[in-house]
Amino acid sequence: MSIHVEARNVVKRFGPTTALNGAEIAIAEGETHALVGRNGAGKSTLVSILTGLQRPDAGEVRFSGEAAPALADRDAWRQRVACVYQKSTIIPALTVAENLFLNRQSDKGRINWRALRARARELLDTYEVDVDAQALAGDLSVEQRQLVEIARALSFGARFIILDEPTARLDGPAIERLFARMRSLREQGVTMMYISHHLDEVYQICQTVTVFRDARHVTTRAVADLPHDELVAAMTGEATAAYESRVRTPGDRLVLEGTGLTLAGRYTDVDLSVRSGEVVGLAGSASSGKVGLAETLVGLRRADTGTVAVNGARVRPGDVPAAMRAGLGFVPEDRHHEGFVPLLSVGENATFPIARKLGRFGVVSPSRRRAKAEEMIESLDIKTEGPDQPVGDLSGGNAQKVVFARALVDDPTVLVVINPTAGVDVKAKQALLGAVEDAVERGAGAVVVSDELDDLRICDRVLVMFHGRVVKDVPRGWTDHELVAVMEGIED
Ligand SMILES: Nc1ncnc2c1ncn2[C@@H]1O[C@H](COP(=O)(O)OP(=O)(O)OP(=O)(O)O)[C@@H](O)[C@H]1O
């Protein structure tokens, strides 16, 4: 089979960090090729080089045996490669049709809106994307947005699509639909590179896998011939046992109570309580209301009715600083919006909640902040040049760990984490779940909201939500099949 996409001997440095150090990949025509590696291994950097967004310091990229176009020739790149990122490249304030066509008006004159809409509808039909061309892109679901991005890529003529952690914000049924579409694209001869920290997905959808470790290529193998533990060992450089959740007995003290909570269109009449030393899970599909409920607990949303109390004291609704003062620590769903400030340093982001405690009269002593930040970097194994590096420069998974550090740094009474391990590698995932269990052992209560069954396994019980209501309180010991059946509303 001929090689469709190739990177040879690629070197890329950012200041003192070498993100790629002679890295290589060769992707055969028509295959779905996984790229895996620990957080900071260099995957996203390779994507930016394969899509022509960054120039390598050394090495080369070839498409179908030919040298890559000049960096400035964006059209030539668009015809060769497209990437569907976790973060959208679609402009929310424009319609779907405008997003599909506005940047490629061939004639410079007036825009013919009717023709533009008709072309958009035709394109969406061709790729079987069931989305209204006139809908505002900002109103689309994550799933619909990805489909529009794939259609846009194909319409430029690209036969190579990179999917960078596409399932990170999709629920189970949406992931199945994405996979069905990827299989059909493959049948049509489209080559794909698939980046994910969910190794089970690699086994489901990919034929070949390349592993990067510490900025280098480690191995490329047929997925069918590579046992799971060998794959993990290639990524981490050592054998890694599966995470074992700890057994504990929750205390009697209620640390968090939500009573009669209703938010129109999201959730209805929810009661929830968490005890000291207890981990309570919230599970359900994308429309279940679980994320909206968790966001209400931490003050990111305000319920229409009902109350939230921490340690028996009511918390002012819809007020994040008040929730933090009351003792809540949280990891939000969207780290890019609510999680961190990219231009501030790792140290500033990680120690933000204790700023008022670190120094007298609200002035933070830099040395104490630094010491605390270094402690968090060490305990969560954050790959960074140090506390002064801006978080915006970290790899995705390492930025998530900084968000986690912020949630933990003030010894919260209640920890609320939403999709806590999104984007983090197998080993880091264990460190983060361990950090939740440590906090709970110290007497905190925790709420874990997740689409990942692995995250929910550390819970003492899981509240399953369906269309805005809690439908079942499932104690520890469930099987995947049982929990998924309740989540999908097939069993009560
Ligand atoms: N613009 C930048 N400035 C400084 N360092 C950077 C920049 N972009 C990436 N890096 C560094 O390069 C290294 C590789 O990062 P990269 O984002 O490619 O990792 P990754 O494999 O995609 O990780 P993840 O799984 O966490 O997404 C990291 O140490 C990161 O901090």
Image: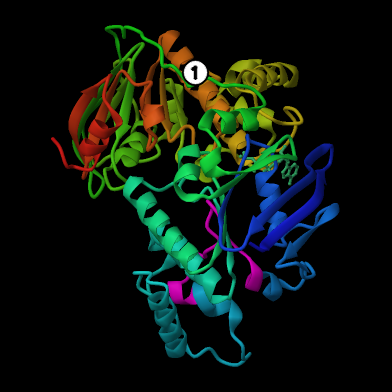
Q: Which residue is mark 1?
A: 434
Pick the residue in front: 286 or 203: 203
Q: Is residue 82 magenta?
A: yes
Residue type indicated by callout 1:
Gly
Q: Is residue 239 above or below residue 65?
A: above
Q: Report the span colored magenta.
A: 78-98
* Residue 121 sits inside the magenta stretch: no
Q: Residue at x 56, y 35 (%)?
A: 400
Q: Residue at x 61, y 27 (%)?
A: 233
Q: Can you name the residue that lies furthest to the left here? A: 492
Asked if 408 appears above or below 214 in the picture, the reply is above
For this view, does 466 lie left or right of residue 101? left
Q: Residue at image x 84%, y 37%? A: 16
Q: Nearer the viewer, residue 466 or 268?
A: 466
Q: Is residue 402 above or below residue 326?
A: below
Q: Secondary structure at mark 1?
A: helix
